Amino acid sequence: MKIKILYALMGLFFVCGAHAADMTIYYSPTCPHCHHARDYASNNFIYEYPTMNITMIDVTVPEHRALFIDVIKTCDFSSGGVPVIKIGDKCFQGFAESMADDMRAAIEIDMDDAAKKSAADVKRAISENGDAYRDEHPTPVATITEYTATGDEMRKKKRPHRTVNGHLGY
């Protein structure tokens, strides 16, 4: 157990020197693809990339619509479908797990080889037994900022609450 902790600390040391690109997910609470994208980011990316910040913006809140319209224009998308995921300068519309490696490439664009290796090791551990990995690492370093309320109100989370059905309990 002490060796695992030592390796985890060493991994954090190497990763802290290279910053992962931040991610913003524009979503609707009633969109099943949005739930899948949010769950995937919260159960995978925040563990793989401890220097990453994820912002989730509910586009059904009237005050957030201007942000959503801006990202649709910036990304040059012809439709306003959700989710829209912006990682650095890269844009993705929709979500399927088959897109995850393309997203990882966008996240890792400015990371050094040691940080990429650390992320790949975590990805492998999660793919082997994600629940066990998350139980051993209950507080990921990366944070999720959730914009769900009107105005500037938001919630910051170190660890999203997982409900029985596997979806986030925001």
Image (cartoon, rainbow, N blue to C red):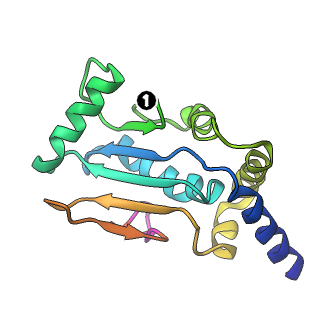
Q: Is residue 113 above or below residue 149?
A: above
Taking the image as shown, residue 106 lies to the left or right of residue 25, namely right
Give the image location of residue 90, x and y in percent: 48, 29
Q: Is residue 96 above or below residue 116?
A: above
* Residue at the (63%, 34%) spot, across then down: 105
Q: Is residue 163 magenta?
A: yes
Query: Where does label 1 land, which residue?
Result: 91
Quadrant where the C terminus lies? bottom left
Q: Is residue 42 magenta?
A: no
Give the image location of residue 152, x and y in percent: 19, 61
Q: Is residue 135 above or below residue 87?
A: below
Q: Nearer the viewer, residue 67 or 77?
A: 67
Give the image location of residue 71, x and y in percent: 29, 32
Q: Over which residues does the magenta segment extend?
A: 160-168
* Residue at the (59%, 31%) spot, across then down: 102
Taking the image as shown, residue 99 lies to the left or right of residue 7, namely left
Quadrant where the N terminus lies? bottom right
